[in-house]
Image (tube, coloured by chain):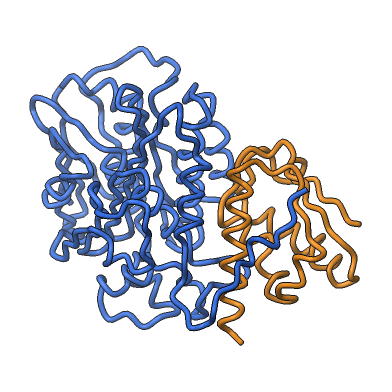
Chain colours: A orange, B blue
């Protein structure tokens, strides 16, 4: 399993979309391509934005659809972060449905 | 260009401030004046004034004007307004740490500028996360819009104020870029500003792509979230670009219900204002010690729907939190 420590990469307020895109391109997409599981650890991250989470996971979700959620897990999320992740997942998969 | 700093420019009456703004780009002079007894400006008006000053300086214009030594001048000095307007303040003050009440004007041009701004504002505010988090969230999302979509030569200007006794925060941001109409027209047909505003404020529509739902880096949901934060907390949201202003009103019949079409909200739309070259946004958010920012975001999540033909599944329930 690939573990990503978000605090180390993005700080306690994870808002920089360039950082999110880098994590997505260097860590998330290559790992998903191998079929391995990924755990994104938010421990120590106190806040994030909808834009950051979208840049982080929308492309993986669109590429593999709903099954991405079988291999992607989120650790240490507070209520605000959890709500933003759920919103982005719902939003991305809703719009992916619409493409089909 | 003429800019008048009035005695009252809150979001509920910001149109008065805007109507006294005269762009006149042919004059190559920025003339600044202010009310003789008191000046009270929402951060949106402060950000716009700073942006106008920086744009004039950037264009090699001359800036003239005098502000009366009214009671709020020390605050405007600490906000760094005179610095960005490039005019001499009527008095001098002993600079001290701006703690607990406001985030002074900051010029944001790059992603690094923005990250530094949202990090540095925490010690400035000396406030709990219920106050700091909404400010950081709003500044980050609006700042990224400026960096990614505005093409503003001077970047964006952002500032914020915390009214502790009113349990309210106010945030303003302004740029002198291409504006909403041109940004939306990159990817969507919009023949006028009201139509471009509707698209820009609708979730799933981004100027970066014609695809509904956005692309891998732009969801087209940033402005929807910001206007929703204002609505759910029972406050104003204002966006002004070109000759048009859209405002979400404080009183809403169904405060917890969010419409994807911004014109279904209780709003006002003004289309004959002096032309602002770029975009300016103001937002008020209520904060108190009992209401967590997460609760506010949760209401948005529960209310959030995109108008689409596809049947919805509760995908969010499948997300694994460990």
- Front residue of B310/B167: it is B310
Which residue is pictured at 58% across the width and 38% down the height? Answer: B116
Residue A82 coordinates in the image, percent (x, y) = 63, 49
Which residue is pictured at 33% across the width and 41% down the height? Answer: B284
- Does residue B21 appear to the left or right of B166 in the view shown? left
Query: Is the residue A85 above or below the residue B88 in the image?
Result: below
Q: How many circles with numbers are drawn on the protein?
A: 0
- Front residue of B316/A89: it is B316
- Does residue B279 appear to the left or right of A72 in the view shown? left
Q: Which residue is outermost to the top?
A: B94
Which residue is pictured at 78% across the width and 48% down the height? Answer: B322
Residue B207 coordinates in the image, percent (x, y) = 45, 72
Query: Is the residue B16 above or below the residue B100 in the image?
Result: below
- Front residue of B156/B199: it is B199
Residue B164 coordinates in the image, percent (x, y) = 35, 23
Which residue is pictured at 51% across the width and 26% down the height? Answer: B128
Residue A31 image-quadrant placement: bottom right
- Front residue of B210/B279: it is B210
Q: Which residue is outermost to the left?
A: B36
Residue B233 coordinates in the image, percent (x, y) = 36, 43
Q: Which residue is outermost to the bottom?
A: A100
- Does residue A32 appear to the left or right of B81 in the view shown? right
């Amino acid at each position: 399993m690939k573990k990503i420590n978000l605090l180390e990469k993005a700080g306690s307020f994870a808002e920089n979309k360039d950082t999110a895109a880098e994590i997505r391109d260097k860590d998330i997409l290559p790992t998903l391509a191998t079929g391995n599981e990924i755990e994104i650890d938010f421990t120590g991250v106190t806040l994030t934005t909808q834009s950051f989470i979208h840049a982080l996971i929308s492309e993986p979700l669109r590429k593999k659809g709903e099954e991405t959620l079988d291999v992607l897990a989120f650790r240490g999320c507070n209520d605000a972060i959890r709500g933003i992740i759920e919103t982005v997942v719902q939003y991305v998969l809703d719009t992916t449905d619409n493409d089909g | 260009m003429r800019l008048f700093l009035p005695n009252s420019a809150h979001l509920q009456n910001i149109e008065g401030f805007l109507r006294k703004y005269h762009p006149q780009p042919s004059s190559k002079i920025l003339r600044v004046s202010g009310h003789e007894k008191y000046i009270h400006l929402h951060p949106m008006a402060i950000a716009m004034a700073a942006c106008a000053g920086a744009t004039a300086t950037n264009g090699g214009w001359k800036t003239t004007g005098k502000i009366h030594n009214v009671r709020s001048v020390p605050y405007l000095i600490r906000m760094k307004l005179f610095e960005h307007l490039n005019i001499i303040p009527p008095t001098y003050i002993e600079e001290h740490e701006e703690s607990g009440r406001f985030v002074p004007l900051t010029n944001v041009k790059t992603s690094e500028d923005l990250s530094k701004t949202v990090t540095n504002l925490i010690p400035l505010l000396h406030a709990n996360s219920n106050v700091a988090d909404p400010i950081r969230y709003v500044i980050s999302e609006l700042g990224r819009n400026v960096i990614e979509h505005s093409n503003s030569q001077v970047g964006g200007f952002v500032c914020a104020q915390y009214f502790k006794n009113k349990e309210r925060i106010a945030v303003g941001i302004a740029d002198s870029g291409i504006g909403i109409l041109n940004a939306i027209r990159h990817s969507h047909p919009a023949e006028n500003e009201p139509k471009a505003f509707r698209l820009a404020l609708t979730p799933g529509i981004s100027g970066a792509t014609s695809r509904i739902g956005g692309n891998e880096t732009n969801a087209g949901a940033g402005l929807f979230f910001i206007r929703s934060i204002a609505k759910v907390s029972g406050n104003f949201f204002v966006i002004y670009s070109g000759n048009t202003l859209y405002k979400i009103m404080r009183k809403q019949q169904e405060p917890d219900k969010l419409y994807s079409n911004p014109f279904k909200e209780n709003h006002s739309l003004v289309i004959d204002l002096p032309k602002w070259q770029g975009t300016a946004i103001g937002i008020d958010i209520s904060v108190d010690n009992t209401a967590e920012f997460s609760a506010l975001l949760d209401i948005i999540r529960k209310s959030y729907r995109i108008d689409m033909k596809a049947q919805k599944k509760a995908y969010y329930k499948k997300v694994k939190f460990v």
